[in-house]
Amino acid sequence: MEAWAGQGEAAEDATARGRALACDGKARGEAMFPVTLFSTNDYLGLSGHPDVRQAAAEAAQSYGMGPRGSPLVAGHTSLHRELEVALAKLKGTEECLLFPSGFSANMAVLTALAGSG
């Protein structure tokens, strides 16, 4: 998905909607060029997709919403388990394990690969 900040649209507004930005290099005599913001949690821009928005609205109606916390802090729920089962089925594997963060996933993988010695 390639998107651009609209004319007159503040970069913060485009970023808040999960859109990639066009950097204006005109001050340096350069052309506009697309920039994907990998520093956000929405670099694919899916937060603005109609299906994702609808699913989020339905989930909020069913389960509520707010800063619940990661499973490490707030506990592993039946929804986490349902996601693990669905991801394992999608990937055709026996099981799937969710990690509370990218850091903890990387640490688990590196620890498993390194072994005990």
Image (spheres, grey):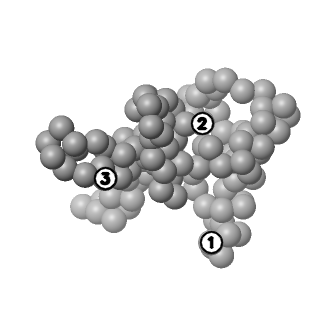
**Could you tell which of marks 1 and 2 lies nearer the N-terminus?**
2
The residue drawn where x is 67% and y is 56% is 84
How would you rate the neighbour count of disc 2 (Cα within 10 Å): few for under 14, some for 14-19, many for 20 or more?
A: some
- Given the image, on which type of amino acid does mark 3 rest? Phe
Camera-side residue: 30 or 79? 30
Name the residue carrying label 2. Answer: 71
Residue 21: which disc?
Answer: none
- Given the image, on which type of amino acid does mark 2 rest? Pro
Of all residues, the one furthest to the bottom in this rendering is: 92
The residue drawn where x is 66% and y is 39% is 76
Q: Position of residue 34 (x, y in %)?
A: 35, 52
Name the residue carrying label 3. Answer: 33
Q: Where is residue 7 in the image (x, y as percent from the top left)?
A: 45, 37
Residue 91: which disc?
Answer: 1
Location of the C terminus by quadrant is bottom left
Of all residues, the one furthest to the left in this rendering is: 28
- Given the image, on which type of amino acid does mark 1 rest? Lys
